[in-house]
Image: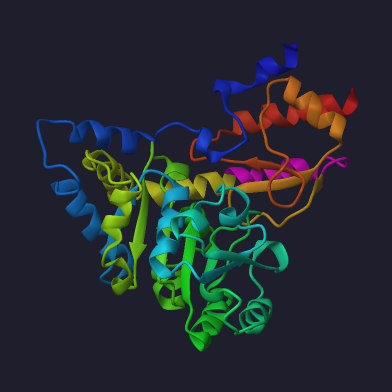
Amino acid sequence: MSRSSDRRPLNQQFASDNNAGICPEALDAICMANVGHAPSYGEDRWTAEVCDLFRELFGCHCEVFFVFNGTAANSLAIASLCRSYHAIICHRLAHIETDECGAPEFFSHGAKLLLADGPEGKLDPANVRQIITKRSDIHYPKPKVISVTQATEVGTVYTPHELEAVSEVAREYGLKIHMDGARFANAMASLEIEPAAITVDCGVDVLCFGGSKNGLAMGEAVIFFDLAAAKEFAYQCKQAGQLASKMRFIAAQWLGILKSGAWLRYARHANQMAELLEQRLRQISQIEVIMPRQANSVFVRMPEDVVTQMHRKGWRFYTFIGAGGARLMCSWDTTEEAINAFVADLKECLLA
């Protein structure tokens, strides 16, 4: 190991916000729920309380379910909105297309993903319309769901106006809207508006609200604003092995971050660290920032030999996601010290 790699503090990395540990509010909440016996399978008081808290947060009655991870959340939510002969329209860079091993198709028993284009990882409503109207014969899958990712796979954020434009197309043709919100908190922190303004008010039928990337150990919230679609979702969760027997430990984590406001505070911190990292990288002439930074990731292009050297120094980051460059992801606990260490090693590699 090289001398300079010793600068890496507390083993922090920029590969994924999944690399970060559990935030104190979630960990404390787990411990507080670990007292005596409690009803299982979501019949506990923590689950009931956090479901009401989500309804308060979004300002409407919604049905809330918890699953272990984002792939299950997206796949089961989409399956609840369509049948096997239907199609789901998503951006060609969407996580459900590139990183879920065919799970949406599997859990919907064959519904096809139709890939749309759009700048900066966002769906272009005109392209979505074109896909919907391309064919209407019985030999082609019938479009039923539009899936949007907030924040997108390349770190950009849909504005309410952009979501409303997609929703308008969905309403015109009777399609449902699914939102992959693995980094929904980061999008909220970027936009600084109420959660309903980019969900309920924009016609979103179901939101998969990510917790794992926001400081939880595990546990994504699947929130149905379309109550009819939620009617038998509990059965889908059970059949898919996603019904937690000790659900109170998932729900309690959400209580910890929602009641304290930590969910948004940590998302703001991650975004701010990404902004700082972007500023530092823009000062290096050999590094090109290739996507707008709007949430907690920075996409850059650097020489291939430098990527190799940085990996040898112990830094982990992905080069196969989204825009084709290197993705540097900041987390709820990313420190300025970690950014300084990364940039210092990067400069050293560029001079080698």
Q: What is the magenta range? A: 273-287
Query: Which of the image's four quarters has the N terminus?
Result: top right
Q: Tag count in the figure?
A: 0
Q: Residue 325 or 25: which is nearer the viewer?
A: 325
User: Residue 316's spot in the image, x, y percent?
Assistant: 66, 29
Residue 285 in magenta stretch: yes
| Above or below 149: residue 328 | above
Which of the 4 image quarters holds residue 235?
bottom left
Question: Which residue is at 53% across, 40% downward?
Answer: 17
Q: Residue 326 or 235: which is nearer the viewer?
A: 235
| Apparent side of residue 85 relative to residue 238 in the rendered image (left or right) | right
User: Residue 269's spot in the image, x, y percent?
Assistant: 51, 45
| Apparent side of residue 293 relative to residue 66 in the rendered image (left or right) | right
Question: Which residue is at 44% across, 72% downward?
Answer: 204
Q: Residue 51 or 190: which is nearer the viewer?
A: 51
Which of the 4 image quarters holds residue 205?
bottom left
| Above or below 195: residue 155 | above
Query: Which of the image's four quarters has the C terminus?
Result: top right
Question: Which residue is at 57% across, 65% downward?
Answer: 112
| Above or below 46: residue 171 | below
| Apparent side of residue 110 relative to residue 259 in the rendered image (left or right) | right
Whether residue 189 can be seen here: no
| Apparent side of residue 156 relative to residue 32 in the rendered image (left or right) | right
User: Residue 46's spot in the image, x, y percent?
Assistant: 18, 47
